[in-house]
Image (cartoon, rainbow, N blue to C red):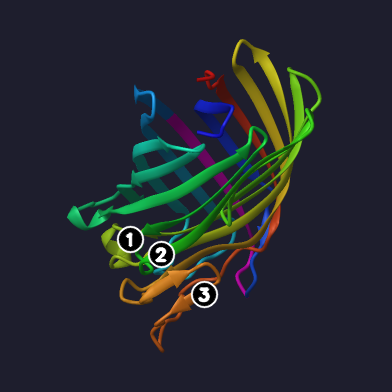
């Protein structure tokens, strides 16, 4: 693996400032998100790692105004998913990632067998130098809005001893400046898009399509040992919590493109506008031993 460090555990919470709606809805909406992750890399042999990551997300949106009947308010969504599989190092500084992704996305009420979704990740990496690694692959998932296929480009690049880029595009981009071994700063872009089923009977198995682009500046401070705290200040762009009928799906979803969209696919609710946020994070960041 090209990484020099790995986050074995993290917990974070994000608070967004109140925003108006982009429609005739009165009042304002507030958004709170929570994330917890646990990562366990198990070295089977010199060239093979069995990798497991378990992630829990919670999204909560509440309006201070009047929302029409049949529209979820407050919106309370949960995501529990696992990425597990093999990281295989092959000759000439090359690696292959094969990960499966079972997941549960919804309001976690009146769940059944249809609540479980499956997906996977394939990624090929090649290290050209110790400070430069690039990779290509794809991520494919079942989704309540329709199957989702995302081409991936991985980039890890060091610029001297202070600056570095770590990215899995189009999902994640991180530019970091490391002042010293205790303090670093950076810029982060994180994109997320997924459907969450409303299992509660009042909503007839509608789903919420959540999308956001988070742009932020951050600082990370080493507390003690391998424990760090991180604070991000940023802005959410293109934020959506759009409610659709369960049958309003597409044949295939790609980044920025839906293929085979039904002619009568219509959203039921209005979305809150973009706005500023602050995120706080506690993490255990461990150096990867040299071979």
Q: Tell me the residue at 47%/61% (across/down).
A: 150
Q: Which residues are magenta?
A: 24-38
Nearest the camera: 109 or 37?
A: 37
Is the C-beta separation of discs 1 and 2 under 8 Å? Answer: yes
Question: For residue 91, which quarter of the picture?
Answer: top left
Which label is found at residue 148? 2
Q: Position of residue 49 (x, y in %)?
A: 37, 30
Which label is found at residue 257? 3
Q: Tell me the residue at 33%/38% (across/down).
A: 84
Is the C-beta separation of discs 1 and 3 under 8 Å? Answer: no
Q: Is residue 99 above or below residue 136?
A: above
Q: Is residue 34 magenta?
A: yes
Q: Which residue is mark 1?
A: 142
Nearest the camera: 69 or 135?
A: 135
Q: Is residue 167 above or below residue 271?
A: above
Q: Is there any visible trace of residue 106 in the rendered image?
A: no
């Amino acid at each position: 693996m090209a990484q020099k460090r790995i986050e074995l555990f993290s917990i974070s919470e994000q608070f967004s400032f109140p925003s108006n709606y982009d429609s005739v809805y009165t009042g304002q909406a507030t958004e709170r998100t929570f994330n917890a992750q646990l990562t366990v890399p198990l070295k089977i042999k010199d060239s093979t790692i069995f990798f497991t990551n378990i992630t829990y997300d919670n999204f909560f949106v509440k309006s201070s105004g009047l929302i029409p009947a049949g529209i979820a308010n407050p919106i309370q969504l949960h995501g529990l998913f696992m990425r597990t599989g093999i990281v295989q190092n092959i000759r000439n500084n090359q690696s292959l990632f094969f990960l499966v992704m079972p997941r549960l996305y919804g309001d976690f009420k009146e769940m059944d067998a249809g609540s479980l979704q499956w997906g996977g990740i394939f990624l090929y990496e090649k290290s050209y130098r110790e400070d430069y690694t690039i990779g290509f692959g794809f991520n494919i998932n079942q989704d309540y809005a329709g199957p989702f296929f995302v081409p991936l480009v991985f980039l890890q690049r060091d610029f001297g001893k202070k600056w570095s880029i770590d990215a899995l595009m189009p999902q994640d981009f991180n530019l970091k400046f490391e002042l010293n071994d205790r303090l670093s700063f950076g810029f982060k872009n994180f994109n997320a898009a997924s459907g969450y089923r409303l299992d509660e009977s009042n909503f007839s198995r509608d789903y919420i399509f959540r999308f956001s682009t988070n742009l932020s500046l951050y600082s990370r401070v080493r507390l003690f040992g391998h424990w760090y705290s991180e604070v991000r200040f940023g802005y959410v762009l293109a934020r959506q919590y759009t409610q659709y009928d369960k049958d309003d799906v597409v044949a295939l979803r790609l980044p920025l493109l839906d293929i085979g969209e039904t002619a009568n696919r219509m959203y039921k609710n209005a979305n809150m506008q973009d706005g500023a946020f602050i995120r706080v994070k506690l993490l255990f960041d461990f150096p990867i031993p040299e071979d």
